């Protein structure tokens, strides 16, 4: 079985060498597909391949590229199909653990990351993921255990800021993390979610609106950018527009538990049943244009 998987993988990579497609355009090369570079083009190509011959490895690759686009709901669907056909593949389990965290299925993310922990696919990133999941589920001692187990010197530079943030969170909370941010993180950094989560109400409304819309435009299927924009609309009392955004989120992420609680809050706010901490200023209420959703 393992030899057959390796053979198919090599054959697929050989077929993905950059070459013209039927329209004379170049298809993504193997490095681009594996790295999630030019993800939209790679997804188009992989979708065509899947139509001809569905396979676990192709679903896995498309899931990786969906993650690069922050399309975590679609990535979750694909990685589940890959695991259905090859349930013990460590690479699939590792990617699934990452995706399950993104869709807030922390229990499944922990289970799969722990399976990876005892394979050759285990990595500092996997241990950091376990720490994050345990902190997210308020299992603080287990989170600290995995932080201690992690050799930070082996963690790629791109993950060092996240590691520092997780360590800070271990001894404080997300409010402190926000206070340590001197500027908006890149949209590709998990810390950008802390920025938007804690920044609502602290960042000037016009700046917040400009930033979150720019992030959402860049990653239109990112569930968190959608939710932060919806929360901003609720804060501005733009309930009709907020409802449209939440409808989009539910379309791709129907099983997210925290989203259900958020929708209850939204419904209460829309009915005027929540206590008002402060009156919104006239300038704040004018920030959101009536047709701003049409841009997305």
Image (spheres, helix red, strand yellow):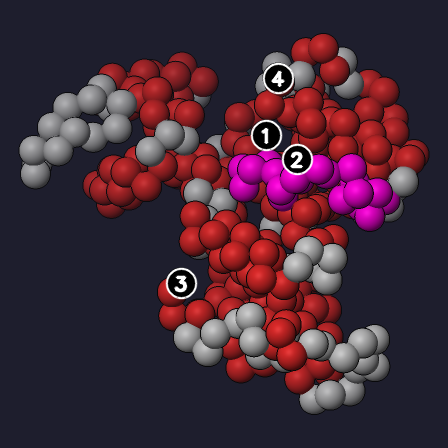
* Disc 4 target residue: 156
- Residue 211 is inside the magenta segment: no
Decide which of tag 3 and tag 1 comes sooner along the chain: 1
Q: How far across and down, in percent of the image, does residue 213 sit?
A: 49, 57
Position of residue 270 relative to residue 154, above or below, is below
Q: In the rendered image, is residue 120 in sight? A: yes
Q: How many marks?
A: 4
Discs 3, 2 touching: Cβ within 8 Å: no
* Disc 2 target residue: 112
Give the SS element for disc 2. helix
The residue sitting at the top extreme is: 153
Give the SS element for disc 4. loop
The mark lying in front, picked from 4 and 2, is: 4
Q: How far across and down, in percent of the image, does residue 80 sit?
A: 50, 44
Give the Cα separation between the discs numbered 3 and 2. 35 Å
Q: How crowded is mark 2: few (under 14 residues within 10 Å), some or many (20 or more)?
A: many
Q: How far across and down, in percent of the image, does residue 136 sit?
A: 78, 45
Give the Cα separation between the discs numbered 4 and 3. 34 Å
Give the Cα separation between the discs numbered 3 and 1. 32 Å
Position of residue 212 relative to residue 100, above or below, is below
Give the SS element for disc 3. loop
Give the Cα separation between the discs numbered 1 and 2. 7 Å
Discs 1, 2 touching: Cβ within 8 Å: yes
Nearest the camera: 140 or 107?
Answer: 140
Decide which of tag 4 and tag 1 comes sooner along the chain: 1
* Disc 3 target residue: 296
Give the Cα separation between the discs numbered 4 and 2. 22 Å
Magenta residues, start to end: 173-192
* Disc 1 target residue: 94
Q: Residue shown at 77%/18% (left/top)?
A: 150
Query: In the rendered image, which quarter is residue 8 located in?
Result: top left
């Amino acid at each position: 079985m393992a030899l057959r998987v390796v053979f198919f993988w090599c054959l697929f990579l050989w077929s993905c060498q950059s070459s013209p497609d039927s329209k004379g355009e170049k298809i993504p090369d193997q490095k681009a597909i594996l790295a999630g570079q030019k993800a939209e083009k790679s997804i188009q190509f992989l979708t065509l391949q899947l139509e001809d011959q569905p396979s676990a490895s192709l679903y896995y690759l498309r899931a990786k590229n969906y993650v690069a686009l922050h399309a975590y709901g679609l990535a979750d669907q694909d990685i589940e199909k890959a695991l259905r056909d090859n349930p013990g593949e460590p690479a699939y389990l590792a990617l699934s653990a990452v995706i399950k965290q993104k869709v807030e299925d922390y229990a499944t993310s922990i289970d799969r990351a722990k399976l990876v922990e005892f394979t050759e696919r285990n990595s500092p990133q996997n241990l950091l993921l376990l720490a994050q999941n345990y902190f997210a589920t308020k299992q603080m001692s287990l989170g600290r255990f995995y932080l201690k187990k992690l050799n930070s010197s082996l963690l790629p530079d791109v993950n060092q800021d996240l590691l520092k943030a997780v360590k800070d969170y271990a001894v404080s909370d997300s409010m402190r993390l926000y206070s340590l941010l001197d500027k908006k993180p890149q949209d590709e950094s998990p810390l950008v979610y802390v920025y938007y989560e804690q920044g609502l109400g602290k960042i000037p409304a016009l700046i917040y609106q400009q930033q979150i819309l720019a992030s959402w435009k860049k990653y239109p299927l990112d569930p968190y950018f959608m939710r932060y924009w919806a929360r901003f609309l609720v804060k501005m009392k733009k309930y009709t527009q907020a409802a449209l955004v939440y409808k989009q989120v539910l379309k791709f992420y129907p099983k997210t538990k925290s989203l259900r609680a958020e929708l209850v809050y939204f419904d209460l706010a829309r009915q005027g049943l929540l206590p008002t901490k402060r009156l919104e200023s006239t300038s704040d209420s004018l920030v959101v244009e009536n047709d701003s959703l049409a841009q997305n």
